[in-house]
Amino acid sequence: MEAHKFYRVLAVIIMIASIGTVIATLHHAYHVIFKGEIATVKIGVYWDSACTNPVPESFPINQTLYEGQNNFTVYIKNEGWYNTSVTMNFSGYWPDGTTISLETFTPMPVILENRGDIAQIDFSLTVTINVEELNTTSYEVYLDFIGEKIE
């Protein structure tokens, strides 16, 4: 009688295992991985035309400005995935009795149509001193280069 019970339990175990095998052959998972970048608008700002010397972002550049026109050239590179329109914003603070103004010699906006396109931007910061003696000579100028997707 004990042997009969044993064989009955063994038969149930074999049936359960067989059902699991049948289900496994009816179900299969295929694992696919996508990896990469999300397409974005991204620009880089560089001192050189080869775009190997980046202008530091959000880090002060120690630069003495002289009275009159101070000329600069930077290079903007499209490092994103979309056609991009680039503009400049200008703000900052400087000593009382002086003014600092921005003049761009490159027509704005600059259009970078393809990833890797580079444009030269020429501009000047002009300093005008309106008093005989300055109490302080510290200044900060903020230039924002803004890239926007072209539809």
Image (spheres, grey):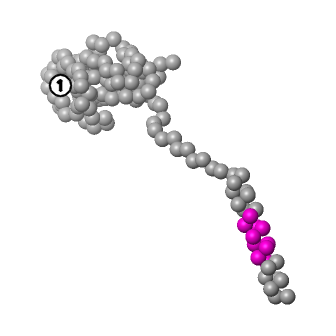
- The amino acid sitting under disc 1 is Leu
Q: Which of 142 and 127 is in front in this view?
A: 142
**Whole-percent x, y for residue 136 in the image:** 18, 32
**Whole-percent x, y for residue 86 in the image:** 38, 20
Write the residue at 16% across / 28% down: 64
Q: Is residue 49 magenta?
A: no
Q: Nearer the viewer, residue 132 or 110?
A: 110
Tell me if I can see residue 76 in this picture.
Answer: yes
**Whole-percent x, y for residue 22 in the image:** 73, 58
Magenta-tinted stretch: 9-18
User: In the drawing, does residue 24 fall left or right of residue 75?
Assistant: right
Q: Nearer the viewer, residue 150 or 8?
A: 8
- Is 80 situated above or below 151? below
**Whole-percent x, y for residue 114 in the image:** 40, 20
The quarter of the picture where the N terminus appears is bottom right
Quarter of the image holding residue 56? top left
Quarter of the image holding residue 37? top left
The residue carrying mark 1 is 65
- Is 103 situated above or below 22? above
Label 1 environment density (alpha carbons within 10 Å; few <14, some 14–19, many ≥20): some
SS class of the residue under badge 1? loop
Write the residue at 57% across / 47% down: 31
